[in-house]
Amino acid sequence: MQITLEALRKLVGAAHVLTGNDVTSRRVDWMTGAPCQAGAIVRPADTEQLAAVMQACHALKQPVVTHGGLTGLVHGAEASPGELVISLERMTAIEEIDQVGGTITVQSGAPLQRVQEAANEVGLQFPLDLGARGSCTIGGNIATNAGGVRVIRYGMMRQQVLGLEAVMADGRVVSSMNRMLKNNAGFDLKQLFIGSEGTLGIITRAVLRLQPPTPSEQTALVACPSFDALTGLLSHMGKALGGGLGAFEVMWQNHYRLLTETLARHTPPIPAEHPFYVIIESLGNDETHHAEQFRAALEQAFEQDLVVDAVIAQSSAQSDGLWAIREDIEGLIKGLAPIFTFDVSLPIADMQRYTDALEKQLVQRWPDGRLVVFGHLGDGNLHISVSVGSDAPEERHAVETLVYEPLKALGGSVSAEHGIGLEKRPWLSTCRSQAEIELMHTLKQAFDPHQLLNRGKILS
């Protein structure tokens, strides 16, 4: 460590500089459970303390890694013994809610679920939603440009951020806490930090956009007879619901059958004999009209042979049960261990051809290999899980080659919403041109010339 622990304790208080077992007892991601190896963990209380810490680190060229909710999947929170972890776990305040302007101002360590609850308490909603809502933090959501299940209606995290504040590598504070929907005064600097995975600055506060409530939620699980029917259903429901389509979450049969029959973790609401299953969520205001509209749309889908079976949730508990099949990542990991997970995006029209070819190649090389697919089909995002019986590095690289290389010809991406971190860094050129990568390096050099922030993440 190039910075003294005594100096850090003076800045944030002795109780908020963790060392030894207090560091190694913490994990750096939820999937592997790998222990934190950082030299120390510092927990600033606010932007001012963090700025002081970064000023000291900059003077001594001390590299740091930022920790939020640690729900990432690309090793973006890994830290070496020579690095210092900045944890934002004390910066969780909900500072202000503007009901008229429809904004909420929060510190970046606030959990997503707490922000959702705070919005609900005043009759509004914060629409970003994902399975890790109870653990992931707003700062992490912004730094990775999180997506989730309602992107098809509300967009990525980028669309929810009006303003933000960040601490630079040298301790300077860039505060652009804009609260307006329209502000074309020069460069929109917040966009540089959104999705940068903490490599350009540490996000400390944000102004988020709130939305009107949608008290009526209609949820159904349906089965589709073919991929053409599946894409036809997506188009049909989008039109029939008049913009009310909130989620269109698809499970390939291999995902649905694994969790409902093979592992028997869930009672199958529909027999596991169909090629595709979709959770359709519609959001509205008038309960009676909305329910009628939803049922009519599904009836039309049956008439057009887009759907062959369906079950509509009659209560929030039933809706939660349907979503539990889609969100049972723990069951997926246990059922396929050792497992390789991927988060890719590609044109919807190419998805079946891509997954069919991938499964064929996997089985040719590993006869007992297994492929499981689910995803946010409406926004072109697939989550792919692969098991080949070993998680050895050479096996991982071989599987990554099969998953990632075809994306270049399809105009796809190796990361739809999880980010790059360390895991996907070797594959960045698959979906970014050399000119784009060079510009990323230029920005990194301008913002952090000593390479102190999340060193080695995204860019080598």
Image: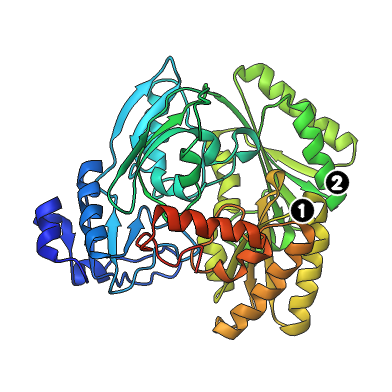
Labels 1 and 2 touching (C-beta < 8 A): yes
Count of numbered labels shown in the rendering: 2
Nearer the observer, 457 or 239: 457
Of the residues under marks 1 and 2, which one precedes in the sequence? Answer: 2
The amino acid on which the numbered mark 1 sits, given as a three-letter code, is Phe
**Does any portion of residue 383 appear in the rendered image?**
no
Residue 127 placement (x, y as % from top left): 52, 33
227 left or right, relative to 289: right
Task: Provide residue 201's location: percent of width, then percent of height.
Answer: 38, 50
Task: Answer whether residue 175 is visible to the viewer in this image.
Answer: yes
What residue is rendered at 57% in x and 64% in y? 332
Q: Which kind of residue does numbered mark 2 sit on?
A: Ala
Q: Image check: 311 left or right of 455?
A: right
Query: What residue sits right under mark 2 in the picture?
Result: 229
Q: Position of residue 128 (x, y in %)?
A: 51, 38
Q: Residue at x 82, y 51 (%)?
A: 349
Q: Is residue 431 above or below residue 80?
A: above
Element type where label 2 sits in the image? helix
Say which residue appears at 41% left-offset and 64% top-offset. 29
* Quadrant of the drawing holding the N terminus: bottom left
Q: Which picture quadrant has residue 258? A: bottom right
Q: Nearer the viewer, residue 389 or 265?
A: 389
Extreme-right residue of the structure: 304
Query: Dot 1, crowdedness within 10 Å: few (<14), some or many (≥20)?
Result: many
> Disc 1 designates what residue?
276
- Distance (Cα) linking label 1 and label 2: 9 Å
Q: Residue furthest top?
A: 100
Percent x, y for residue 401? 68, 75
Residue under the point 20% across and 46% down: 49
Indicate the secondary structure of the residue bearing disc 1.
Answer: strand
Return the residue nearer the eye: 68 or 193. 193
